[in-house]
Image (tube, helix red, strand yellow):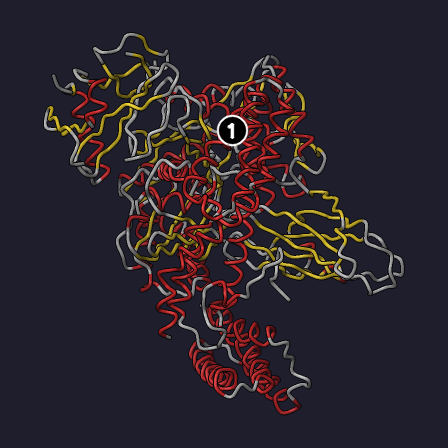
């Protein structure tokens, strides 16, 4: 399996990285805690750590540490608009249940 | 479901604990709100995609309209439609020329009150309505708790105006992380903080105000080294010059307010058109008698308004003097405010400095964008090591014999700053005295702004001249004053009764807040509990981090005490007793005081350690 | 003493790990100031406890005051004298008083930019020579009393220089 970006998401990330002026790609991870057990981490990455798994999707490098990968493998990251609000959304096949906030989940 | 934004490396937060912070430009004519989302500062639009929200509030009997909705009421109900509240905020009735506004102004406990359909409103309340609207817009975008806001204020705003702006934010339920000077915000938006070193001029010509600031940047430290301003100069004066030119060869007086309004609108339009075209032909019939047929060029407009432009250049010279600089020391000039779109201005400033201008960010949006960046930094969402240092915009002094001002804290002092002054009694057995604090550069009390009157009480009775009372004036990073006093020979703390000459005291704010909560049907107690719990959890989190870093700085006994207090607070947080939580927070604060001190000293030593060796070589 | 708040235990030189003398390495002072402020400015404690916020405010205030004092040669000299509890025990005498009045009159009479600039140059030179005397007396001869007289003169000259500058600015 792998981690992928939708074209829209990739386009956005590219734009953000450009205006930020530095960074090698995107870092995806999970943290414990949050309202339903696990929470997503979405950060800019300035370097690739040796243990990171590196995926590439639409030209964007996605870095994931192996521990997190178990919980998010197969995830597609999308960029959407809801009303006037816009941002990224995890489409994660491993999720059994998630909190209404969209940022934490159980597997 | 909330959508995620990308954080800086290592700056991710847990769900529901995001440090969402916004930047607000609370302007005289319009206001904006912005936030950094996925590393990029953006203006947040309202539901109709408007970016600029008119700073206008309309009071109906049952409802309050803000922004464009309020602007529509301006023509048919001007007395209940409040514009330019920023010009009134933190001022007294005597500061204002009443005939310049259609509003019904009254004196309200030292403050200006405005009579409306909903009773008397202060400019603070009016501003808070605008802030509420901006906060709601931000809420719509962020859909999560907003931890705080950075609000921009003109650099020349005095203590009263800054305090009033903060009060307005409190009334709107916003936590103010920091007030930022508008020019500083503009410099941030241009990313000048990313440069290694440089000295920059910020030229800010708004609708009704002019502001010049000189900023010095060196290695991540941003310092406002001088500010000058003219609160009575702005784009409106350029309109007025055109207005006078339009009517100069009409032989009738313009008295009809409708025609007057039409002429003002026409003047504005000519000004804006002259930003695009060199020559404008005017052919307008305003009434049966009045036909205006004229031609104007940019050069003529420039001549017509030269005295105004010269006034701005004079302020630049004064600011350069304050900063001990010449034009050769200036590395860049940032243009802010809609009025800087005028080619007249661009040219004059360019000619003065003999340099290209920084003007490619929308001059109406640049301040809000910079405020958002500062909010993001303060909230701890970046790894940037930038620090903004501000200075006092005006000197702070006290009244002495003969109503002469003695300056205590000079203008352009770096904040925070404190100064102590010793006073003595002039009568035997005197137990109280009055201190009058003023702000301004002039020598006489009547020419300065009265900030506050303090009465010092509880001075131990002694013979005249024996008491030594040290009064310490502290100005914090937002430019706000606080005062403490102590009698030195007996070491007694004199109590201070503050009578602010302006602004709201805590009691007033509380009662206004309660009013607004009752009308908004919100449960005050519930909110207070939630806030207390949030505060408690944050304290625990911070302490956990502090202990993991610096536990070595304190001994076992102290750690044990802290651990006990932590457990106490954790227990209290399980329950819903607000007072108990409060008490445990206080307790934890008490037992960590020494630890906090040790950490602070340690970080100073750490900061200096790179320098110690060099010192020894000296 | 002026500027001592909240029971400050270090003197201003100690804050920056500097030796208490007149001739300071100003670059080093500035670097130390900035390094310290970056670690303790209240803006770094927005998310901190009330204790830490309060401390950050107090410390930053002290550091600001110390820096402003040491940065300025006249304030620095005054501070060193204050630390040693030295005060001049008599005035400067009639000669300097006459001289002061003369200077003030000259300033009053000058109404052209060139004249003012030339006058400023003259005063600046006198000021630097007074400052050199202060340095010599404090750092080398340890004659603080003598230094205090030169400081009185320097203080006057510095104020005068500022007045000349302001007048010249207003002429423009």
Give the percent coordinates (x, y) of residue C80.
Answer: 55, 75
Q: Does residue B72 sit above or below B563 in this rendering?
A: above
Quarter of the figure that contains the N terminus of chain B: top left
Give the percent coordinates (x, y) of residue B559.
Answer: 52, 40
Q: Is residue C29 left or right of residue A97?
A: right
Q: Is residue B579 visible?
A: yes
Give the percent coordinates (x, y) of residue C157.
Answer: 54, 79
Q: Does residue B361 sit above or below C124 in this rendering?
A: above
**Residue carrying label 1:** B174
User: In the image shown, does A100 or C78 lie closer to the viewer?
Assistant: A100
Q: Is residue B153 left or right of residue B283?
A: right
Task: State the residue lying farthest toward the right.
Answer: B428
User: In the image shown, does B129 or B296 lie closer to the viewer?
Assistant: B129
Q: Does residue B594 sit above or below C22 in this rendering?
A: above
User: In the image shown, does B205 or B303 lie closer to the viewer?
Assistant: B205
Q: Which residue is at 22% across, 29% downward?
A: A27
Q: Specify the quadrant of the image occupied by residue B169.
A: top right
Q: Is residue B56 visible?
A: no
Give the percent coordinates (x, y) of residue C128.
Answer: 46, 82
Q: Residues within 10 Å of mark 1 (few under 14, many from 20)?
A: many
User: In the image shown, does B485 or B295 lie closer to the viewer?
Assistant: B485
Disc 1 is placed on an element classified as: loop
Q: Is residue B126 left or right of residue B432?
A: left
Q: Does residue B122 sit above or below C108 in this rendering?
A: above
Q: Is residue A2 left or right of residue C41?
A: left
Quarter of the figure that contains the C terminus of chain B: bottom left
Number of marks drawn: 1
Q: Which residue is at 37% across, 44% downward?
A: B186
């Amino acid at each position: 399996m792998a981690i992928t970006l939708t074209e829209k998401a990739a386009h956005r990330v590219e734009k953000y990285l450009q205006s930020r002026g530095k960074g090698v790609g995107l870092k995806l991870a999970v943290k414990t805690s949050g309202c339903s057990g696990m929470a997503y981490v979405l950060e800019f990455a300035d370097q690739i750590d040796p243990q990171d798994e590196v995926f590439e999707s639409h030209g964007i490098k996605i870095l994931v540490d192996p521990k997190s990968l178990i919980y998010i493998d197969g995830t597609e990251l999308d960029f959407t608009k809801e009303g006037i609000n816009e941002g990224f959304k995890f489409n994660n096949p491993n999720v059994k249940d998630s909190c209404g906030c969209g940022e934490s989940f159980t597997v | 479901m909330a959508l995620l934004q990308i954080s800086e490396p290592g700056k991710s937060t847990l769900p529901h604990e995001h440090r969402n912070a916004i930047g607000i430009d609370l302007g005289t004519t319009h206001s904006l709100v912005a936030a950094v989302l996925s590393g990029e500062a953006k203006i947040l639009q309202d539901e109709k995609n408007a970016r600029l929200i008119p700073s206008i509030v309309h009071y109906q009997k049952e409802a309050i309209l803000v922004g464009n909705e309020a602007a529509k009421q301006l023509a048919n109900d001007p007395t209940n439609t409040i514009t330019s509240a920023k010009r009134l905020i933190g001022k007294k009735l005597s500061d204002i020329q009443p005939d310049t506004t259609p509003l019904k102004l009254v004196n309200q406990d030292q403050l200006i009150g405005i009579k409306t359909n909903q009773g008397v409103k202060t400019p603070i309340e009016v501003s808070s309505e605008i802030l509420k609207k901006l906060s709601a817009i931000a809420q719509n975008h962020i859909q999560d708790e907003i931890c705080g806001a950075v609000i921009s204020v003109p650099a020349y705003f005095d203590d009263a105006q800054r305090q009033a702006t903060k009060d307005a934010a409190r009334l709107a339920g916003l936590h103010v992380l920091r007030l930022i000077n508008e020019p500083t915000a503009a410099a941030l938006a241009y990313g000048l903080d990313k440069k290694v070193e440089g000295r920059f001029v910020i030229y800010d010509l708004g609708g009704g105000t002019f502001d010049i600031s000189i900023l010095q940047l060196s290695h991540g430290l941003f310092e406002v080294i001088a500010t000058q301003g003219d609160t009575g100069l702005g784009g409106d004066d350029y309109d007025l010059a055109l207005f006078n030119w339009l009517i100069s060869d009409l032989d009738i007086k313009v008295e009809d307010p409708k025609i007057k309004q039409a002429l003002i609108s026409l003047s504005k339009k000519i000004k804006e058109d002259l930003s695009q075209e060199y020559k404008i032909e005017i052919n307008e019939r305003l009434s049966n008698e009045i036909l205006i047929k004229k031609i104007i060029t940019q050069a003529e407009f420039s001549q017509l308004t030269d005295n105004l432009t010269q006034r701005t250049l004079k302020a630049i010279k004064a600011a350069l003097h304050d900063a001990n600089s010449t034009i050769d020391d200036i590395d860049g000039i940032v243009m802010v405010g809609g009025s800087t779109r005028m080619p007249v201005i661009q040219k004059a400033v360019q000619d003065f400095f003999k340099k290209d201008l920084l003007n490619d960010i929308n001059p109406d949006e640049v301040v809000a964008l910079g405020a958002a960046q500062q909010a993001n930094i303060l909230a701890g969402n970046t790894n940037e090591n930038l620090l903004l240092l501000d200075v006092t915009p005006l000197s702070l002094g006290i009244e002495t014999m003969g109503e002469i001002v003695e300056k205590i804290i000079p203008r352009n002092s770096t904040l925070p700053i404190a100064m102590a002054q010793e006073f003595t009694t002039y009568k035997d057995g005197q137990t109280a005295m009055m201190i009058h604090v003023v702000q301004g550069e002039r020598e006489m009390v009547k020419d300065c702004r009265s900030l506050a009157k303090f009465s010092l009480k509880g001075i131990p009775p002694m013979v005249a001249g024996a008491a030594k009372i040290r009064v310490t004036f502290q100005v914090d990073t937002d430019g706000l004053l606080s005062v403490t006093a102590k009698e030195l020979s007996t070491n007694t703390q004199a109590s201070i009764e503050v009578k602010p000459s302006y602004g709201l005291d805590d009691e007033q704010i509380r009662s206004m807040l309660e009013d607004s909560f009752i009308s908004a049907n919100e449960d005050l107690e519930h909110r207070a509990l939630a806030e207390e719990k949030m505060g408690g959890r944050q304290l625990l989190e911070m302490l956990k981090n502090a202990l993991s870093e610096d536990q070595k700085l304190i001994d076992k006994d102290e750690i044990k005490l802290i651990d006990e207090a932590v457990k106490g607070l954790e227990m209290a947080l399980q329950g819903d007793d607000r007072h108990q939580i409060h008490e445990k927070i206080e307790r934890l604060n008490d037992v960590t005081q020494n630890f906090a001190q040790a950490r602070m000293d340690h970080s100073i030593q750490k900061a200096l350690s790179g320098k110690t060796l060099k010192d020894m070589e000296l | 003493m002026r500027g001592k708040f909240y029971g400050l235990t270090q003197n201003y030189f100690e804050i920056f790990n500097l030796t208490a003398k007149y001739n300071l390495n100003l670059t080093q002072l500035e670097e130390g100031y900035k390094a310290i402020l970056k670690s303790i400015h209240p803006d770094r404690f927005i998310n901190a406890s009330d204790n830490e916020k309060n401390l950050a405010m107090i410390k930053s205030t002290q550091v600001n005051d110390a820096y402003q004092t040491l940065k300025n040669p006249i304030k620095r000299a005054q501070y060193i004298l204050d630390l040693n509890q030295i005060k001049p025990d008599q005035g400067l005498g009639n000669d300097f008083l006459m001289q002061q009045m003369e200077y003030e009159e000259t300033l009053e009479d000058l109404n052209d930019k060139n004249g003012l600039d030339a006058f400023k140059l003259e005063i600046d030179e006198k000021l630097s020579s007074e400052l050199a005397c202060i340095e010599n007396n404090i750092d080398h001869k340890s004659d603080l009393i003598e230094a205090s007289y030169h400081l009185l003169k320097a203080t006057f000259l510095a104020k005068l220089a500022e007045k000349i500058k302001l007048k010249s600015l207003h002429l423009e």
